[in-house]
């Protein structure tokens, strides 16, 4: 009975180790010497074949991305004007420096200063960054 379990664990470990990309001899030794522990050891080993396939797939994706980046760089270099990815913001009409910004009402919500763009609560009398006075229609 002991000899049969020895052979069984050796064969199972050999099959599992070959399936994961390891040497069959390592599997036989682990199965014969360790029995069930050898089988558990082989089961928790990382799958070398799957790792190699993942590496090849990642390498192919990386090559594809490099080719796309190179093509985009060639397009950008060949164009006379640089391609802007940001829409230009139309300039705001110039107001006298002391003209207050008018808001509908004081609020606890965040507003942006029309002059400098700083975000702040809408209950202030002036912008904390640039000093632009704030005026409220409703009080």
Image (cartoon, grey):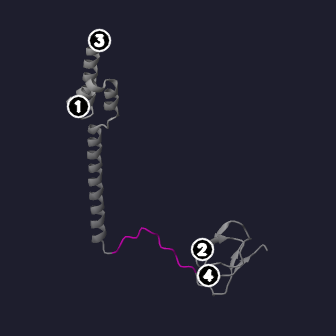
The reply to whether dot 2 and dot 3 touch (C-beta < 8 Å) is no
Q: Secondary structure at mark 2?
A: loop
Q: Position of residue 43 (x, y in %)?
A: 33, 31
Q: Which residue carries the number 4 mark?
A: 130
Tell me the tag on residue 26. Answer: 1
Magenta segment boundaries in residue numbering: 81-92
Q: Which residue carries the number 3 mark?
A: 1
Q: Which residue carries the number 2 mark?
A: 118
In the image, taking residue 98 as reference, residue 73 lies left or right, namely left
| Image vertical order of residue 34 relative to residue 105, above or below | above
Q: How far apart in space, not on screen, are marks 4 and 1 (Cα)? A: 74 Å
The reply to whether dot 2 and dot 4 touch (C-beta < 8 Å) is yes
Query: Mark 4 or mark 1, which is nearer to you?
Result: 1
Other residues around mark 1 within 10 Å, as few (<14) / some (14–19) / many (≥20): some
Q: Nearer the viewer, residue 132 or 37?
A: 37
Q: Earlier in the sequence, mark 1 or mark 2?
A: 1
Q: Earlier in the sequence, mark 4 or mark 3?
A: 3
Q: Secondary structure at mark 4?
A: loop
Q: How far apart in space, not on screen, are marks 4 and 3 (Cα)? A: 90 Å
């Amino acid at each position: 009975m002991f000899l049969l379990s020895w052979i069984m664990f050796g064969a199972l470990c050999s099959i599992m180790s070959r399936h994961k990309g390891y040497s069959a001899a390592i599997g036989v030794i682990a199965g014969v010497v360790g029995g069930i522990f050898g089988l558990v050891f082989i089961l928790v080993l990382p799958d070398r074949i799957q790792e190699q396939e993942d590496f090849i797939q990642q390498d192919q994706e990386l090559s594809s991305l490099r080719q796309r980046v190179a093509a985009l760089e060639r397009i950008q270099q060949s164009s006379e004007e640089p391609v802007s990815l940001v829409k230009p913001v139309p300039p705001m009409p110039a107001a006298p420096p002391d003209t207050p910004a008018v808001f509908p009402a004081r609020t606890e919500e965040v507003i942006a200063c029309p002059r400098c763009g700083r975000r702040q609560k809408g209950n202030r009398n002036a912008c904390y960054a640039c000093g632009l006075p704030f005026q409220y229609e409703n009080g």
